[in-house]
Image (spheres, rainbow, N blue to C red):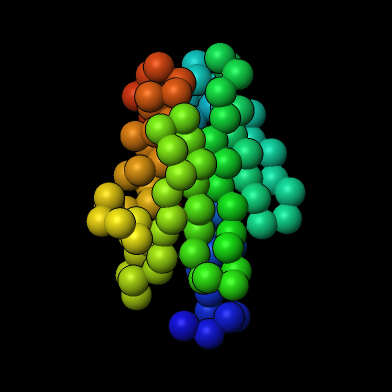
Amino acid sequence: MTELEYMDRAEALLRAVEASCDRINDDTDADIDSQRVGGMVTLTFANGTQIIVNLQKPLQEVWLAAKAGGFHYRFDGSQWMDTKGQGEFFAGLSRHASQQAGVPLAFSS
């Protein structure tokens, strides 16, 4: 994948994370604060915990940092997959956000 293709796909992922936060805040009482600075989105939950999603341009990866640990995702041609076989990005984000928020949350692309 070229650098331009990576940036297009990675930026689309960050926009989808932000849009999912907006939808979740409209549809639930989860109250997620979403802050974007450059290639990084920080999600802060009502209990003060955070999830950070940031771009790793040199590696063409997207990294997710949650209470459960750090996860690296690489685009496989159709979706962002964990580099250690732990599944798709939005499924992982939904799982970790649900654990940290204490309520079921669904993020999508």
- Indicate left or right for 91 with 30 as reference: left
How far across and how far down the image is residue 10, in percent?
A: 54, 64
As drawn, 14 above or below 92:
below
Image spot of residue 96 (x, y percent): 39, 33
Nearest the camera: 28 or 50? 50
In terms of image quadrants, where is residue 102?
Answer: top left
Q: Is residue 81 above or below residue 76?
A: above
**Residue 14 visible here:** yes
- Identified at 38% across, 27% down, the residue is 98
The residue at the point 53 percent across, 70 percent down is 59
Q: In which quarter of the image is residue 103?
A: top left
Examine the rendering and report whether any part of residue 21 can be seen. no
Q: In which quarter of the image is residue 76?
A: bottom left
Left or right relative to 68: residue 4: right
In the rendered image, the vertical position of residue 51 relative to residue 32, given as above or below: below
**What residue is rendered at 40% in x and 68% in y?**
75
Indicate whether 79 appears above or below 77.
above
Residue sitting farthest toward the bottom: 2
Number of numbered discs: 0
Q: Where is residue 104 in the image (x, y as percent from the top left)?
A: 34, 24
Q: Return the residue found at the far right.
A: 37
At horizontal 60% and vertical 19% (from top left) the residue drawn is 48
